[in-house]
Image (tube, grey):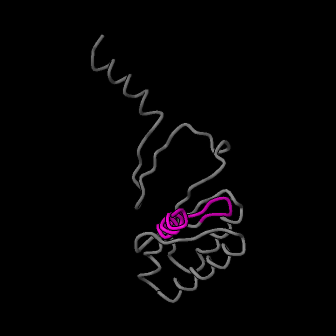
Amino acid sequence: MDKSKIFGNISSLFKKDKEIELGDEYVELEANVKQSKAKINVRPFKLEKFEDVKDIIHAIREGYTIALINIAPLREKDRLALKRAIEKLKKTLEANDGDIAGFGENFLVATPSFASVYREKEKESLEEEAE
């Protein structure tokens, strides 16, 4: 039997489980994991217009989604709409005991009530209380 066929067959077994696909800005790893077993989703969103905030709010209100939000497209187009969208997200998360924080200049993370965002300030205040 030809060695190239053997290695080709072996490598094809591994490629079926995990394939890397390049999207617009994200690398998606496809694995054999059933969606129904996942209890919490970490989901990327893009804010390209103010109306996009509705999808994010809906996903977070369901309680099973941590949203990673790319705000760069809206920041470049309309800073006022970006400010309104962030305020709407903040109010919704506050009402639902969620959390929101920025990281970097172009991303926000929004969590439902069961999760919180780690902040360096919290670490420092906990260390001070311990002393």
What is the x, y in percent for residue 23? 42, 56
Tell me how many marks there are: 0
> Quick one: 81 or 111, which is closer to the camera?
111
In this view, the residue farthest toward the left is 3
What residue appears at the point 52 percent right and 83 percent down from the top-left corner?
82
> Quick one: 76 or 16, which is closer to the camera?
76
Up/down of 81 relative to 70, above or below: below
**Residue 103 quadrant:** bottom left
What is the x, y in percent for residue 40? 63, 52
Q: Is 93 colored magenta in this rendering? A: no
In this picture, residue 104 sits left or right of residue 111: left
What residue appears at the point 42 percent right and 33 percent down from the top-left corner?
15
Q: Is 118 colored magenta in this rendering? A: yes
Q: Which residues are magenta?
A: 111-131
In this picture, residue 42 sits left or right of residue 12: right
Q: Quadrant of the N terminus?
A: top left
What is the x, y in percent for residue 108? 50, 70
In this view, the residue farthest toward the bottom is 80
What is the x, y in percent for residue 123? 50, 64
Up/down of 105 relative to 111, above or below: below
**Residue 36 quadrant:** top right
Up/down of 59 relative to 2, above or below: below
